[in-house]
Amino acid sequence: MEAEKQLRFSTKKASVPILKLLNSAIANAKQNAGLAKENLYIASIVVEAGRTLKRWRPRAMGRAGRIMKRTSHIILSLEQKGILKAEPEKTEKKFEILPQEEAVSKIPKQKKTYATTSRSKKRIFGQQAEGAGKKMFRRKKI
């Protein structure tokens, strides 16, 4: 594979673990699916954030500095050349014409939605009874 050659001669630090992952994926494809190495290609490779190890380092005047040791998850998928994926069958939706009364009864009622900001929640849910909403203390006399 061309990817294997590129990773073997790359000077990047991450090329060694990715090469090991690629070789493992090729071996799995041979063993489990019986695929030939020459027909495989990398369909996608994704690197996601993994667990972060939090460590501490002593700093001046009794303080501590945080060290974040980040890890990652690498997802590599191989596919075989020359095989086309089957397209999912398209199903047409059939609509039914109902009399006016039945059509109105089948329409779902929409729930009342509220804005998600804290100010709008206070305005909607924090309303008090009439007359009780006046402030107790004011700087200026009305």
Image (cartoon, rainbow, N blue to C red):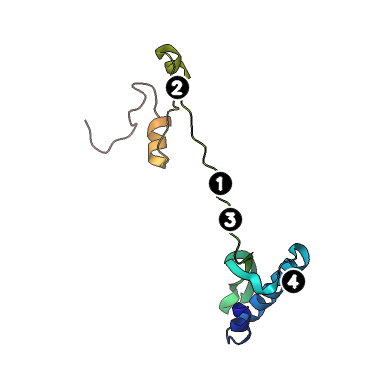
Earlier residue among tags 3 and 4? 4
Spatial CA span between label 3 and label 4: 23 Å
Which corner quadrant of the image does residue 104 belong to? top left
Q: Position of residue 95 (x, y in %)?
A: 46, 26
Q: Residues within 10 Å of mark 3 (few under 14, many from 20)?
A: few
Q: Residues within 10 Å of mark 2 (few under 14, many from 20)?
A: few
Spatial CA span between label 1 and label 2: 30 Å
Earlier residue among tags 1 and 2? 1
| Viewer-nearest of discs 4 and 1 | 1
Residue for badge 2: 107
Residue type, label 3 = Lys
Residue for badge 4: 27
Residue for badge 3: 85
- As drawn, 25 above or below 83: below
Q: Residues within 10 Å of mark 4 (few under 14, many from 20)?
A: some
Residue type, label 1 = Pro
